[in-house]
Image (cartoon, coloured by chain):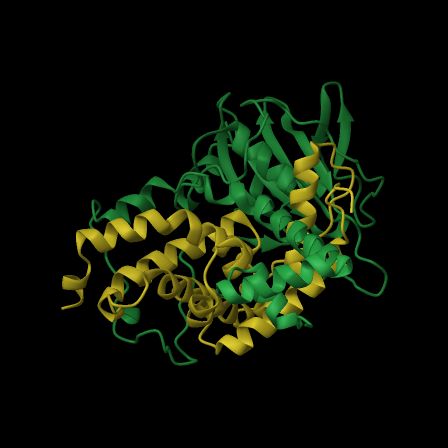
Amino acid sequence: MNIDDATLMAYLDGELDAEGVAQVEAAKARDPQLAASIARQQRQDARLRTSHAAAAEAPIPDALMQLVLGHAAPAPAPDTAASGEAATPGNVVALRPRKRARVAWSHLGALAAGIVLAVIALPMLRDAQGGADWEQGADGLRASGALAQALDRQLASETSGKVRIALSFRNQAGQYCRTFVVDAASTAGLACRDGQGWSLPVLASQAQASSGELRQAATPLPAVVLDAVDASIAGDALDAQDEQAARQAGWR
Amino acid sequence: MKHDAVTPSFRQALCERLPKLRRYARNLAGTPHDADDLLQVAAERALARAAQWDPDQPLDPWLYRIVRNAWIDEVRARRRGQALFADAELGEQVGVASVESHAVRLSVEAAMARLPEEQRSAIALVLVEGLAYREAAQALEIPVGTLTSRLARGREALQALLGDESGEVQ
């Protein structure tokens, strides 16, 4: 008998009863093409699961655990309590400002803490409007121009100009570090403050959007940058207040 | 009254599910940071609405639904505010000198990020989170038939985006 696509998918997802499974497997045994197609889909499904396996392993931020377990004294949002799941279209609840601990997200793998990742695919791009955003220093890349300014002045909550600061934290060496995205250059990286300014232990380039598909939206941080954060962060990310204080103190 | 529903066992159950809820949040929000923010909002809502959960019903679909609705509200809020929103697109990675599994993970994530949210949610809930069709349909508030057609289209699109590069001999 023929196995239709819906049945095939239900088979792959374990939604068939024993009889249905037996039918598919009989058909599979008779039809090598069907067997190959099932195997291909199973490989893809497995790949999907593998790629997401690590995502559920990272620890949950402590503050959130305390909230859920009721150890903290939470102030539940009064506006949402009564409205129910069927919120009216006008009932918009914005995400709260970023102030919780940011904990390791990525699977750290072989990344040893504190190791500085290699510089990746440094784009030849130079900013058309105002000089280079980074330069080669004696001990690696350093921020300059608009990027250095943004790192000095811009808070993570602000979006101004072409640089977006995503996250600020202290690394295990006690330096202030900040992740950033330079949208114009499709480039993102990690900057850490030392005596001379901002060094760039990680700089990653993202592929330019294919022609006719200009990317208007902000470029998200690539995993390689996030991995570097996870490997070097000491404690929690700075909240808005800490960040302001750090800026005030010149990131020292 | 709503506080009566937040029993220690409810708290415990929610707690145990946070890692998986965050994984789904990551599939929706695109970046780990946004996913953590989303998870926080969803957890607060789950606690605030605990009384609305019917203990005879499975908890997981209810929680995934809260995550998704929180995300939809957030997207709406951001669009309204003209704030930056990347539609969860990860972009392509180039020149990442890294281990193979890393590269595979990125490309799967990038492919997932390209799917329309409906298909991405169907794939994430059934294939990644392991919900039954019926549960995933509950979470998305759609009929099972709609779920399976989104799932089928999503799978097809992923296959087209990823090819068959599992490294295994076909």
Q: Is residue A62 left or right of residue A214?
A: left
Residue pictured at 62% horizontal, 33% vertical:
A191
Q: Nearer the viewer, residue B57 or A234?
A: B57
Residue sitting nearer the eye, A10 or A108? A10
In the image: residue A185, left or right of residue B25? right
* Relative height, residue B166 to residue A113 (above, below): below
Which part of the image, by quadrant, shows the N terminus of chain B? Answer: bottom left
Residue occupying image coordinates x 31% and y 48%: B15
Q: Nearer the viewer, residue A184 or A129?
A: A184
Quarter assignment of residue A142: top right
Image x and y of residue B39, in percent: 41, 54
Chain colored green = A
Residue at coordinates 32% horizontally, 61% vertically from top-left?
Answer: B59
Tell me, yes or no, if residue B120 can be seen here. Answer: no
The chain letter of the yellow chain reads B
> Image height check: is B89 above or below A119?
below
